[in-house]
Amino acid sequence: MMKLYFNLSPNPMKVVLALEEMDLAYEPAVVDTRKGAQFRPDYLALNPNAKVPALVDGDAVVFDSNAILLYLAQKTGRFSPAAGDKAQGEFLSWLMFVATGIGPFSGQAVHFRHFAPEQVPYAHRRYQYEAERHYRVLDERLSGREFIAGDAYTIVDMAAWGWARMVPFVLGEDAWAKFPNVKRHLDAISARPAAARVEALRGQFASAFKADMDDEARGYMFKHLTA
């Protein structure tokens, strides 16, 4: 059985969605990043970058959420175009758009909006602008389309779902008015049975993670503060 090292943040949750959609058996393993579990030697042996998630599948170890999504799609032959299919270029382009754009800019926007220990107006403006710009690109892509890449539901949609759930936290409570197509896409995926199972897992494990962002948690989450 596969073992998924996770917490409840967007990147692990999109992998959980993929595992549920693919009907794959997996064991969830808690990595509480606010307690520094990502820096344990046994976890660093799986992911030297000290991030979640990481997946162990027999002798295979995969880290980075988008690498895991690709690995699972190739393993099962599901939710991605076949090798050599003309749709593969579009599929990979949009997957990397989420991986290198939506995710990182959303994460930085959240940091400077909610967690930075000092106000940095330039950084806040830059990352709010770039996060909003990326969601606008995605919203335009979804205009008149059900799915992001091609005509079928793929891991690209799952990857975007992981972060789209956080749009109000990233950009403010009124942000959905700017991205109606992203909201429609999010709601459609959230209505799927697999997404309901993701939410059930979140509820099951919510109490297993430290909730407070106190000085100890900031020391583990934002290492540059103590470097």
Image (cartoon, helix red, strand yellow):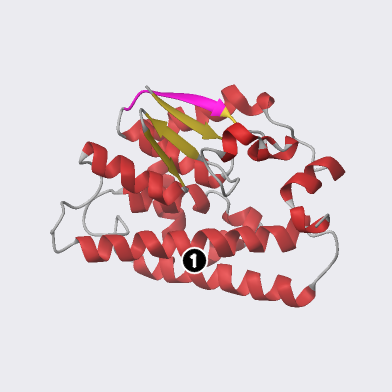
Quadrant including the N terminus: top left
Quadrant of the image occupied by residue 45: top right
- The correct choice, above or below, for 216 with respect to 138 in the image is above
**Magenta region, residue range:** 24-29
Disc 1 crowd, CA 10 A, few/some/many (<14, 14-19, 20+)? some
How far from the left and from the top, in percent, is residue 83? Answer: 16, 54
Read off the residue under disc 1.
101
Above or below residue 94? Residue 126 is below
Q: Is residue 193 left or right of residue 213?
A: left
Quarter of the figure with the C terminus: bottom right
Left or right, 189 with respect to 87, comes to right
Q: Is residue 227 left or right of residue 126?
A: right
Task: Tell me which corner region of the image, top left, top right, bottom left or bottom right, holds residue 119.
Answer: bottom right
Disc 1 marks a residue whose amino acid type is: Gly
Q: Which of 75 and 91 is in front in this view?
A: 75
Q: Which residue is drawn at 53% across and 48% down?
A: 165
Q: What element carries label 1?
A: helix
**In magenta segment, residue 117:** no
- Residue 35 is situated, as x and y percent measured from the top left of the image, at 74, 35
